[in-house]
Image (cartoon, rainbow, N blue to C red):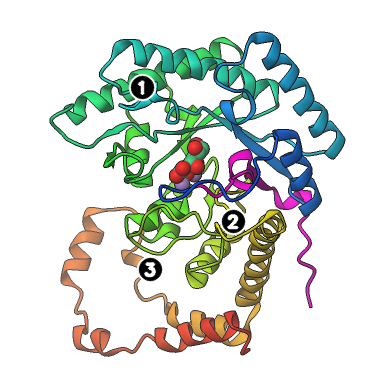
């Protein structure tokens, strides 16, 4: 039996808004008491987390005076010092207050857009003060219910202007900060701009400082869009843009369920963990999810402990997959290369192209070959469910 105790080197983090979620939903009110940020830090320390992330207003109420802000931040810092927890990531709440009902950076009202910039700069200052090196942008209300409201080109232009401005602000302050853009297809808006990680990656290339901007893919959000999350994560990694990751779980094509990581799609979660561990992703593993509404304070701890435990179990399974002689022999056979095509591989040359066009391929033989993915997948299933 392996040791599934979370350790700081696993970099497991939770948002104040995740373990602090009191269980309200559009059909019912809160079922759990609201915990203060200091209390949440202590719960996270008790369950063995490494860090805590926050929106500005998870910690400092939107209408706090400067003196109140300083007192709250001092108390929070003391809790961090007492527990050893760190704040790797911070973000801005640009969606709860009525001022943001038509978005923040993309709102049609220039005063709202300006307020959003001002609020974000102050939230960046707060995040940096607490030690954050990653700043997340989730455009929760940057979207529409009706396209009559705005041409999406205008939305993209405003989003680009805001991010360019904030990149410059961060550099001007001398902050060592990277931005991570988080996509979501819908909810709370009917449609949200830049709906998937792939859209975000293409958008980043249009910014003035693309080197400081990456992505924060979230499992649930890509599943809402019916996509293979691990493939999106792989593309972000390939582009050097996997700055952060939001782990949770979610049935396909549903509302934002925010279930505990590993609670629903075990196989998808397994291949995701295997990917992250195989490539050596070194960033935080952030659980952006919350306990079922049925749970009390103890259930919230079960949720948090379970998220980390499931990750570590899947990590162990990934190591076993990589060390399994039968699975590896099968993979070697599937990927066998007799070297006969070496002359055709790699960079283009005119000679190579001519030789390739002239080569007598045995198409029927190539098409007739069985690829043994059925056996490979069954071995994976057996390994995952403990039957090997
Ligand atoms: C959601 C989002 C948020 C963001 C958070 C940080 O669907 O509500 O995932 O939880 O991750 O606002 O940007
Ligand atoms: Mn989400
Ligand atoms: Mn998220």
Dot 1 and dot 3 residues touching (CB under 8 Å):
no
Query: How far apart are labels 1 and 3 at the CA level?
Result: 52 Å
Residue 172 higher or lower than 164, as above or below? above
Q: Is residue 20 visible?
A: yes
Q: Which of marks 1 and 3 is in front?
A: 1
Q: Name the residue rendered at 56%, 86% in the picture.
A: 382
Kindly indicate the quadrant of the structure image that contains residue 345: bottom left
Q: Name the residue rendered at 63%, 43% in the picture.
A: 20
Residue 300 higher or lower than 379, as above or below? above
Residue 82 higher or lower than 380, as above or below? above
Q: Residue 291 carries which label?
A: 2
Q: Looking at the picture, how far across and down is residue 334, in whole percent?
A: 43, 81
Residue 178 higher or lower than 175, as above or below? below
Query: How far apart are labels 2 and 3 at the CA level?
Result: 53 Å
Lateral position of residue 361 relative to residue 174, left or right: left
Highlighted range, magenta: 1-24
Q: Which of marks 2 and 1 is in front?
A: 2
Q: Which mark is residue 342?
A: 3
Label 3: how many Cα within 10 Å (few below 14, some 14–19, many 20+): few
Q: Which of marks 2 and 3 is in front?
A: 2
Q: Name the residue rendered at 55%, 50% in the picture.
A: 23
Residue where numbered disc 1 is placed: 105
Q: Residue 78 carries which label?
A: none
Q: Earlier in the sequence, mark 2 or mark 1?
A: 1
Q: Does the magenta stretch include residue 17?
A: yes
């Amino acid at each position: 039996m392996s040791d599934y105790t979370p350790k700081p080197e696993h970099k497991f983090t939770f948002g104040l808004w995740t373990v602090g979620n009191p269980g309200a939903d559009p059909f019912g009110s809160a079922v759990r008491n609201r915990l203060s940020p200091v209390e949440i830090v202590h719960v996270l320390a008790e369950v063995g987390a490494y860090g805590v992330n926050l929106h500005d207003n998870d910690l400092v109420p939107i209408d706090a005076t400067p003196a109140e802000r300083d007192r709250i931040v001092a108390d929070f810092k003391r809790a961090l010092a007492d527990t050893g927890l760190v704040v790797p990531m911070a973000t801005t709440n640009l969606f709860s207050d009525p001022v943001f009902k038509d978005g923040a950076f993309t709102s049609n009202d220039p005063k709202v857009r300006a307020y959003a910039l001002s609020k974000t700069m102050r939230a960046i200052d707060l995040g940096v003060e607490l030690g954050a090196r990653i700043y997340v942008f989730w455009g929760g209300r940057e979207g529409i219910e009706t396209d009559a409201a705005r041409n999406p080109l205008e939305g993209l232009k405003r989003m680009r202007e805001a991010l360019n401005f904030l990149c410059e602000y961060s550099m001007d302050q001398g902050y060592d900060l990277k931005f991570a853009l988080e996509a979501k297809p819908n909810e709370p808006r009917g449609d949200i701009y830049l709906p998937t990680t792939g859209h975000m990656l293409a958008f980043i290339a249009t910014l003035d400082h693309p080197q400081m901007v990456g992505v924060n893919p979230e499992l649930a959000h890509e599943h809402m869009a019916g996509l293979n999350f691990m493939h999106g994560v792989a593309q972000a990694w390939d582009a050097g843009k996997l700055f952060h990751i939001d782990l949770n779980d979610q049935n396909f094509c549903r509302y934002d369920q925010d279930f505990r990581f590993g609670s629903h799609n075990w196989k998808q979660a397994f291949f995701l963990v295997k990917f992250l561990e195989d490539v050596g992703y070194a960033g935080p593993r952030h659980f952006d999810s919350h306990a079922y509404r049925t749970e009390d304070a103890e259930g919230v701890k079960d949720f948090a402990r379970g998220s980390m435990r499931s990750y570590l179990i899947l990590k162990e399974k990934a190591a076993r997959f990589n060390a399994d002689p039968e699975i590896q022999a099968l993979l070697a056979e599937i990927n066998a290369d007799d070297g006969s095509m070496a002359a055709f591989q790699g960079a283009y040359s005119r000679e190579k192209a001519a030789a390739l066009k002239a080569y007598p391929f045995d198409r029927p033989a190539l098409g007739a070959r069985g690829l043994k993915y059925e056996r490979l997948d069954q071995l994976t299933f057996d390994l995952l469910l403990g039957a090997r």
